[in-house]
């Protein structure tokens, strides 16, 4: 082998080692699942809750919400690493401010898309009311909430990083987060003895410091930083817990909807207790493939490329969904068992291709 070839191959291997291989895989999984959230939601409220189609659609939707949690877990795994030096100025400029700027740029873009979708004329008054004023007055297109949320999480990193460098503190926080932000709120959707004593307690005592997406941020850090302690036995138990929780979410969600006579989204959220274990199991499943990906420079490059388009997929997939809707492609065309995964794949591929194209344009690549 020529010296130049050996050197080039060595550089490729070094480059792959700098990346955390399994996080690329988890990022790809998260991107696909987030697309599935919106694909599976297309007709979930219009289906008869007694039908098999509803049960299937609800199952896909329950699973898909794990993708939101996975995105936050990836950010936590990277941002809270103790060995990573933290530059406060760089953190605020490159993360927090960057995500806020992106939020308003894409918010304006999707306001224009909304105007086009409604067939509105681009008069000065319409632009002023539906674009400029909307930047302050409206929340933005349905998927953009993630950008300010993740920006605020990065703002908290300097305050919590040193504390969460200790495993015991992470465990303590995660236990309180699970009980107060996930388990009890999920439990309170159902009737049981002494329920209202628990309601009174949680009404009188505010656990908001342990709520929100910070819990998943810390969970990602915990599973990443102490991944060597996850034995095969623990991994199998977590897989079993994740699968059982997913099955439980599907059953309870369908039964709740039938009891209410309409779609009930109690189990279709990152803040259902079941989603916690499903997301953790998917994250750890990604970890198990780390060595295989890292050992192959070619596989590493492929996963790195696909992972590099995922943020663009998140930003652009509503446009892809609009394209499919315009040409009549919806989940109602056939059984959701086929239509949801197929349309999810087509949407992810189309928005991924668009993202890959935009990444080649120097000015636009900073936006995705």
Image: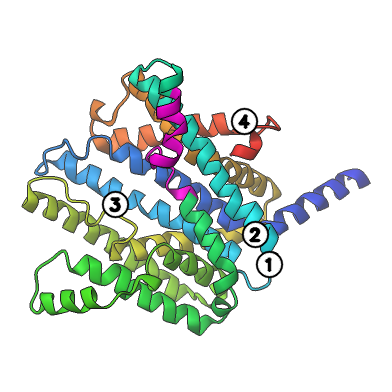
Residue depicted at x 82% and y 53%:
10
Mark 2 nearby-residue class (10 Å; few <14, some 14–19, many ≥20)? some
Q: Which residue is mark 1?
A: 86
Of marks 2 and 3, the one in the foreground: 2
Q: Which residue is mark 4?
A: 358
The colour scheme is rainbow
Q: How many marks?
A: 4
Q: Which residue is mark 2?
A: 91
Q: Which residue is mark 3?
A: 62
Residue 286 in view (yes/no)? no
Along the viewing direction, whichever of 9 and 267 lies nearer the viewer? 267
150 left or right of 116 in image? right
Measured from the top left, where is residue 306 in percent x and y? 58, 42
Question: Considering only order in the chain, which callout, 4 or 2, is on the residue closer to the N terminus?
Answer: 2
Residue depicted at x 51% and y 40%:
104
Q: Which mark is residue 234?
A: none
Spatial CA distance of label 2 from label 4 is: 25 Å
Kindly indicate whether the residue at mark 2 contacts the one at mark 1 (C-beta within 8 angstroms).
Answer: yes
Q: Secondary structure at mark 3?
A: helix
Question: What's the magenta region?
Answer: 127-147
Kindly indicate whether the residue at mark 4 contacts the one at mark 2 (C-beta within 8 angstroms).
Answer: no
Of marks 4 and 1, the one in the foreground: 1
Q: Is residue 312 above or below residue 217?
A: above
Measured from the top left, where is residue 309 in percent x and y? 57, 40
Q: Is residue 13 above or below residue 217?
A: above
């Amino acid at each position: 082998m020529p010296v130049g070839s050996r050197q080039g191959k060595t550089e490729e291997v070094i480059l792959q080692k700098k990346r955390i291989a399994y996080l690329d895989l988890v990022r790809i999984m998260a991107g696909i699942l987030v697309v599935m959230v919106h694909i599976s939601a297309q007709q979930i409220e219009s289906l008869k809750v007694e039908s098999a189609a509803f049960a299937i659609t609800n199952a896909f939707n329950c699973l898909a919400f794990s993708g939101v949690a996975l995105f936050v877990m990836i950010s936590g795994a990277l941002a809270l690493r103790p060995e990573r030096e933290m530059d406060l100025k760089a953190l605020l400029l490159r993360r927090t401010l960057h995500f806020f700027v992106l939020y308003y740029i894409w918010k304006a873009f999707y306001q224009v898309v909304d105007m086009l979708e409604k067939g509105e004329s681009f008069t000065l008054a319409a632009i002023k009311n539906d674009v400029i004023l909307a930047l302050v007055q409206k929340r933005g297109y349905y998927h953009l909430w993630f950008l300010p949320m993740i920006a605020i999480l990065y703002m908290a990193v300097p305050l919590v990083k040193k504390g969460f460098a200790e495993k015991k503190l992470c465990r303590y926080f995660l236990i309180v987060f699970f009980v107060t932000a996930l388990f009890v709120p999920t439990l309170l959707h159902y009737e049981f003895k002494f329920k209202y004593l628990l309601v009174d307690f949680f009404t009188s005592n505010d656990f908001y410091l342990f709520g929100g997406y910070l819990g998943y941020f810390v969970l990602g850090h915990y599973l990443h930083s102490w991944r060597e302690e996850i034995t095969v036995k623990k991994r199998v138990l977590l897989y079993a817990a994740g699968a059982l929780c997913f099955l439980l979410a599907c059953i309870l969600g369908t039964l709740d909807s039938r009891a209410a006579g309409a779609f009930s989204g109690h189990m279709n959220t990152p803040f259902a207790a079941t989603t916690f274990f499903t997301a953790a199991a998917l994250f750890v499943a990604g970890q198990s493939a780390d060595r295989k990906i890292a050992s192959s420079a070619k596989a590493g490059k492929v996963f790195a490329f696909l992972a590099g388009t995922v943020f663009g997929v998140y930003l652009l997939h509503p446009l892809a969904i609009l394209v499919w809707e315009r040409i009549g492609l919806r989940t109602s065309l056939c059984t959701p068992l086929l239509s949801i995964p197929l349309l999810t794949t087509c949407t992810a591929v189309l928005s991924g291709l668009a993202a890959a194209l935009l990444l080649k344009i120097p000015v636009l690549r900073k936006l995705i």
